[in-house]
């Protein structure tokens, strides 16, 4: 299942059930108070040893992000670890991840929309921790600009 935050209702809603026989490789959510090129908050996958509950707030340590574009625009995917999970305490950069983990995530996002009408996804490469922190900062600035224009 894919959930999205409904700004008008102020709640987490079910966006859609995936149309393919695939599942998200890690817990999937968004970073609050961010805004990306697709008009949505910045997406994040959080690696954790236990499943996370939809709608919960998690202290996550950003590791890297995958460049991606879909029918709505740029749609980067941040990969992070649960900062309170001791199993990931030593994961601080892409070099601490298995290459297979990054390939698995890229393959999921390259294929997960193939059966949906008028939807597509194109994945690119991975960017490191510094670039990821910059992306989060820029996405937060985009959010603040949007909020200012709504209240301004």
Image (cartoon, rainbow, N blue to C red):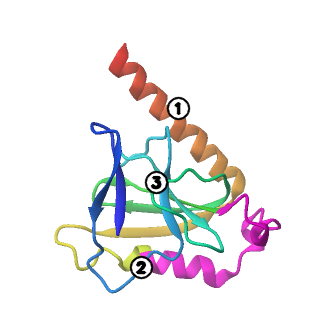
Query: Closer to us: mark 2 or mark 3?
Result: 3
Among numbered discs 2 and 3, the one appearing first in the sequence: 2
Badge 3 local density, few (<14 within 10 Å), some, or many (20+)?
some
Foreground residue among 123 and 104: 104
Disc 2: CA contacts within 10 A as few (<14), some (14-19) or many (>=20): few
Please tell me how crowded label 1 is: few (under 14), some (14-19), or many (20+) other residues with Cα within 10 Å: some
Q: Are marks 2 and 3 in contact (CB under 8 Å)?
A: no
Sequence-first tag of 3 and 1: 3
C-alpha gap between disc 2 and disc 3 = 18 Å
Of the image marks 1 and 2, the number of the one nearer the N terminus: 2
Q: Which residue: 67% across, 81% down?
A: 99
Q: Is residue 44 left or right of residue 72?
A: right
Q: Which residue is mark 3?
A: 55
The magenta stretch spans residue 104: yes
Instruction: Indicate the quadrant containing the C terminus: top left, top right, bottom left or bottom right.
Output: top left
Q: Judge whether 19 appears above or below 71 on screen.
A: below
The Cα–Cα distance between marks 3 and 1, rounded to whole angstroms, is 23 Å
Residue 141 circle label? 1
What residue sits right under mark 2 in the picture? 23
Q: Nearer the viewer, residue 16 or 79?
A: 16
Magenta range is 81-108
Q: Assess whether mark 1 and mark 3 are in contact (beta carbons under 8 angstroms).
A: no
């Amino acid at each position: 299942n894919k959930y999205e935050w409904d700004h008008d209702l102020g709640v987490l809603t079910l966006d859609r059930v995936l149309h393919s026989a695939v599942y998200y490789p890690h817990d999937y959510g968004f970073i609050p108070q961010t805004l990306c090129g697709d008009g949505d908050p910045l997406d994040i996958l959080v690696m954790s040893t236990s499943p996370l509950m939809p709608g919960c707030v998690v202290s996550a340590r950003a590791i890297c992000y995958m460049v991606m574009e879909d029918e709505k625009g740029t749609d980067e995917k941040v990969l992070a670890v649960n900062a309170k999970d001791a199993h990931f305490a030593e994961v601080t950069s892409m070099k601490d991840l298995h290459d297979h983990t990054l390939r698995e995530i890229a393959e999921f996002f390259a294929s997960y929309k193939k059966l949906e009408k008028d939807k597509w996804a194109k994945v690119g490469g991975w960017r490191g921790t510094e670039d990821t922190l910059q992306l989060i900062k820029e996405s937060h600035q985009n959010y603040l600009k949007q909020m200012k224009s709504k209240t301004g």
